[in-house]
Image (cartoon, grey):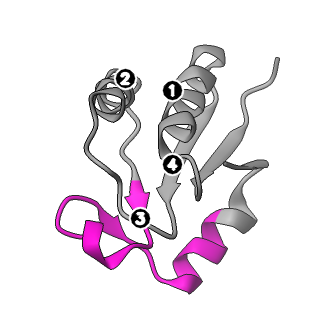
């Protein structure tokens, strides 16, 4: 399987988006994860997925201003650029 640039958009289900993003690195894909629409809720499940992201070398980004203290904040133009440069976009 050829390496791809994959963008995972965490819109409605942040936990599942983090799980999917981490799993995609098994195939040596280059994976980016962007949180959209709402802040990440601190739960044990999300903490577990954050640890997997760290192990997978995925540094999440966000369009949610409330998350900008911890993550890189993307504006609409930056997000559009990332979407255009991706081979695959997964929206969860």
Q: Secondary structure at mark 4?
A: strand
Please tell me which of labels 4 and 2 falls first in the chain.
4
Q: Which range of residues does the magenta coloring cover?
A: 61-82
Identify residue for label 2: 52
Q: Looking at the image, is 23 positioned above or below residue 6? A: above
Residue 33 % position (x, y): 51, 48
Quadrant in the picture for residue 83 = bottom right
Residue 62 % position (x, y): 41, 64
Please tell me which of labels 4 and 3 falls first in the chain.
4
Q: Report the side of 85 relative to 41 (left or right).
A: right
Residue at position x 58%, y 36% from top?
30
10 Å neighbourhood of mark 2: few (<14), some, or many (≥20)?
some
Q: Report the side of 54 relative to 84 (left or right).
A: left
Please tell me which of labels 1 and 4 falls first in the chain.
1
Please tell me which of labels 2 and 1 falls first in the chain.
1
Q: CA distance from mark 4 to mark 3?
A: 8 Å
Task: Tell whether label 3 touches label 1 (CB within 8 Å).
Answer: no
Residue at position x 33%, y 21% from top?
55
Decide whether residue 25 is among the magenta residues.
no
Identify residue for label 1: 22
Q: Secondary structure at mark 3?
A: strand
Q: Secondary structure at mark 1?
A: helix
10 Å neighbourhood of mark 4: few (<14), some, or many (≥20)?
many
Please tell me which of labels 2 and 3 falls first in the chain.
2
Number of marks drawn: 4
Q: CA distance from mark 2 to mark 1?
A: 6 Å
Residue at position x 44%, y 73% from top?
63
Identify residue for label 3: 62
Q: CA distance from mark 1 to mark 4?
A: 9 Å
Identify residue for label 4: 33
Task: Tell whether label 1 touches label 2 (CB within 8 Å).
Answer: yes
């Amino acid at each position: 399987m050829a390496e791809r640039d994959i963008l995972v958009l965490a819109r409605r289900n942040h936990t599942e988006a983090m799980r999917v993003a981490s799993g995609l690195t098994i195939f040596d894909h280059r994976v980016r994860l962007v949180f959209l629409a709402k802040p990440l809720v601190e739960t044990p499940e999300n903490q577990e997925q954050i640890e997997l992201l760290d192990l997978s070398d995925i540094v999440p980004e966000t369009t949610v201003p409330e998350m900008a203290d911890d993550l890189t904040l993307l504006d609409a133009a930056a997000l559009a650029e990332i979407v255009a440069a991706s081979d695959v976009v997964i929206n969860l």
